[in-house]
Every structure is written in C-alpha cells, then in structure tokens.
Image (cartoon, rainbow, N blue to C red):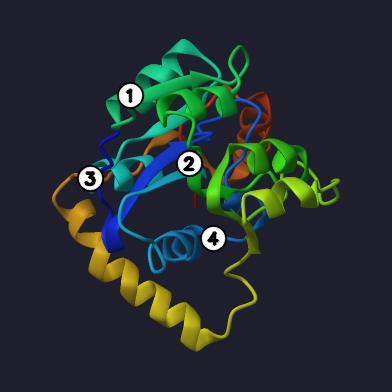
C-alpha cells in the first residue's frame, strides 16, 4: 500500500480529533503541549510510517499540509464535515465506530506506527492494539485517567514502545528549541493559510463560567477564547 510522507519521512494518520464531544485538548489542564507533541512525532520518524495521533484539529491540518493521510474522529456529522474540510481523509464517528478497526482496515492490517494520545488510561489497551509492529505510543495527556492495566505480552509481540512527554516540566532552553522548530516548520504554513486556528466561540472574561459550561457540553467545534 502506498505511504505518504511528512517531515522526516513520516506518514501521519490523525485520529481522535478533539473538536469537542467527550474529548478535551491538551491545554485544558493548563499545559499547552502543542509544540512538544509536534516535536515528539517528527524527529525520529522512519520513511513510510503510518502515524495515528489523538490530538486536535491543528495536527490534522499539519499532516494534510505535508501530504499525509489524515484520520480523525468526531462525535457529530457537523464536526466530521469540519475535519474533512480541514484535510481529513476519513472522519470516524467515535460513538458508532471503533477507531482501531478503521485504522486496521485503512492500513491493510498494519496499524499505526506512532500514536499520539492525550486520553491516557481509558485508551491504553486499544492504543496498543492499534499499534503496528515496532510502533510507538506517545502519551501527552491523561484526560481518560491515570491508571490502567497494560498487556505487556501484546506490547512485546509488537516490539512496541510507550513514551510519555509533557512541555510544562521541560527546562527553558528545551522549550525555546521547540518554539524555534515550530517557527521553522509550522509558522510558514500558518502564514500561507495552509493551517489555521479553529475558533468556535469568543467570550469576555466575566463570562468564563459560560465558557466552561460550553466546553463541558462538548457542543463546540474548535477553541473557546476568553477576552479581557
């Protein structure tokens, strides 16, 4: 099966698109892991990899901009339309479909070489199942809990790896290096319109309670901004 390329030779499949529904983005816990997540995927990729990331619309756009195959999930028809508009090849209804099965079918049974996950415990078992041989599961969040049972035998059979990373605890020099990489690789795509911020709602700071209620409802498609 033909495999497309991303930076460093990675072909990227974006899964679990966090545009609302039951999922929340990495910055909901106060840690904007976006730059770190990008770096976690790109540097060590091998030519021809399939990657599945459980992240928000930004990553789907980045992947599409670099010619990758993009998979994402969303809980409503409107959100699936949006992620397709942003470059997703397949938009998965996570309420009715199993993303593991969809990824397996789409990769001729191979699975994902890299999975970027911000759900944590609740998705651990399925993420391991979705991994390809010698695949890497990169955990960048714990929206679905912090403790889960790991089938080490399943991981060993795939010669897989589980990696955890966060931006908040890194030294300032590492954060600066990550920012510089984003300026080099991402900002040009923002400047030419290939990648754009998806904003659902803008509210004044005094209506922060409404913003939290909207986020908890899962009815938003994109970021919720508070303005002074």
Classify 10 Å Cα crowding around label 2: few (below 14), some (14-19), many (20 and above).
many
Tell me the CA gap for discs 2 and 4.
11 Å
Classify 10 Å Cα crowding around label 3: few (below 14), some (14-19), many (20 and above).
some
Tell me the CA gap for discs 3 and 1.
13 Å
Task: Name the N-terminal-most of marks 2 and 4.
Answer: 4
What residue is disc 1 on? 84
Task: Name the N-terminal-most of marks 2 and 3.
Answer: 2
User: Helix, strand, or loop for circle 1?
Assistant: helix
Q: Are marks 2 and 3 in contact (CB under 8 Å)?
A: no
Q: Are marks 2 and 1 in contact (CB under 8 Å)?
A: no
- When asked about the image quadrant of residue 101, the answer is top right
User: Helix, strand, or loop for circle 3?
Assistant: helix
Q: Are marks 3 and 4 in contact (CB under 8 Å)?
A: no
Task: Name the N-terminal-most of marks 4 and 1.
Answer: 4
Quarter holding the N terminus is top left
- When asked about the image quadrant of residue 211, the answer is top right
Tell me the CA gap for discs 4 and 1.
24 Å
What residue is disc 4 on? 33
Indicate which label's residue lies in the foreground, 3 or 4.
Answer: 3
């Amino acid at each position: 099966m033909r495999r497309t390329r991303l930076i460093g030779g990675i072909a990227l499949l974006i899964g679990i698109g966090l545009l609302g529904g039951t999922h929340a983005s990495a910055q909901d816990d106060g840690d904007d892991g976006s730059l770190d997540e990008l770096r976690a995927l790109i540097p060590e990729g091998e030519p021809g990899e399939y990657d599945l990331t459980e992240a928000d619309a930004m990553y789907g756009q980045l992947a599409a901009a670099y010619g990758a195959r993009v998979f994402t999930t969303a809980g409503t028809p409107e959100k699936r339309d949006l992620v397709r508009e942003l470059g997703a090849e397949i938009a998965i209804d996570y309420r009715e479909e199993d993303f593991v099965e969809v990824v397996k079918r789409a990769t001729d049974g191979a699975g994902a070489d890299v999975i970027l996950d911000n759900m944590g415990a609740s998705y651990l078992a399925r993420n391991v199942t979705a991994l390809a041989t010698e695949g890497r599961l990169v955990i960048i969040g714990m929206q679905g809990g912090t403790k889960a049972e790991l089938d080490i035998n399943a991981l060993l059979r795939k010669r897989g790896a589980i990696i955890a990373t966060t931006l908040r605890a890194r030294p300032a020099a590492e954060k600066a290096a990550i920012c510089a990489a984003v300026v080099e690789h991402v900002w040009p795509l923002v400047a030419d319109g290939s990648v754009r911020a998806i904003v659902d709602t803008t509210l004044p700071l005094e209506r922060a309670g409404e913003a939290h209620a909207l986020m908890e409802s899962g009815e938003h498609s994109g970021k919720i901004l508070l303005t002074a």
